[in-house]
Amino acid sequence: MNAAVKRSASIVGTAAGRRSAHSLVMMRHGQSTWNLENRFTGWVDVPLTDKGRAEATAGGESLKEEGFEFDMVFTSVLTRAVTTCNLALEAAGQSWLPTVKDYRLNERHYGALSGLNKAETSAKHGEDQVKIWRRSFDVPPPSLDRSDEHWPGHDRRYAALSPDVLPLAESLAITCDRVVPFWESDIAPALAAGKRVLIVAHGNSLRALVKHLDGIGNEDIIGVNIPTGVPLVYTLGDDLKPLPCPAGRTAAAPLSGYYLGDQAAIEAEAARVAAQASIRA
Ligand SMILES: O=C(O)[C@@H](CO)OP(=O)(O)O
């Protein structure tokens, strides 16, 4: 697409008349050091690898190439998302954008699994159990206790929060319980005000968000895996519900959003994420 074709909170024609459309792009951070080492990460604050930095830059370049412009950016308080956000915005020529960092976009907290190797955990507990911990909607992984180094109460970036909101472990359902209220209180109002929004977050906080937006059922969300560093594009209607994927693009079913880039490579990467806890990984 010509770079001159700018995406906007615009008016689009439909058979039923004309309605406004809101532009939302989500992006998972690039590969982190613990993605590379195949370790459960959650709220542990690991950096990007060189490959992850390159993915973030490539994501920003494809946004620029496709003519995406934003008015506001949301990211988590974890370094891998913040760095991805900075690199992508720099590559897109939009580093100056107002950016909100909020813990409610953090990765889901992996509790006592934090730091463990995924394949080794499968070898110990079985692949079925680990799949339940990784992808079931409402079964949390085993909990930490507050003395554990991975409990966020030891980290000063959460000092303003009540210890009661700091997780000991989170299922996707618990993650939804913080992501969706943040969507309602901060992101949806920005979109409703006509702002074009970029969200840079994490595999599971984004699964929580697309589950909410697309109304994906608790069983179907198990099969949703989000690749690192690839922009996922949604157009929302006036009610901030997703509009159908535009002609010429392929929705990443069951999502109504579409990924920018080589579709076969993106599908292969999502399948690789799904298989990360295989004993052979
Ligand atoms: O470890 C994590 O925090 C997440 C994302 O990397 O892993 P998973 O895909 O297993 O939920």
Image: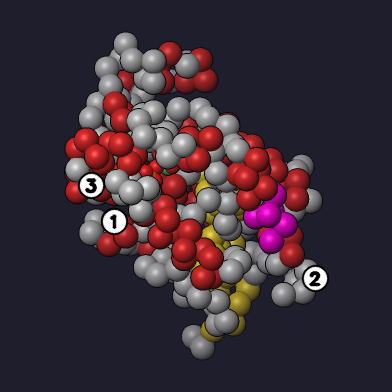
* 59 in magenta: yes
Q: Position of residue 168 (x, y in %)?
A: 30, 25
* 27 in magenta: no
Residue 5 location, quadrant: bottom right
Q: Is residue 34 left or right of residue 166?
A: right
Q: Residue furthest top?
A: 147
Look at the numbered disc 1 and give the secondary structure of its residue.
Answer: helix
The three-letter code of the residue at mark 1 reads Ile
Residue hosting label 2: 4
Predominant secondary structure, magenta span = helix
Residue that appears at 19% across and 37% down: 125
Residue hosting label 3: 127
Circle 3 crowding by C-alpha within 10 Å: few under 14, some 14–19, many from 20: some
Q: Position of residue 163 (x, y in %)?
A: 35, 17
Considering only vertical position in the picture, is 13 above or below 269?
below
Residue 226 location, quadrant: bottom left
Q: Tag on residue 222? A: 1
Q: Is residue 177 visible?
A: no
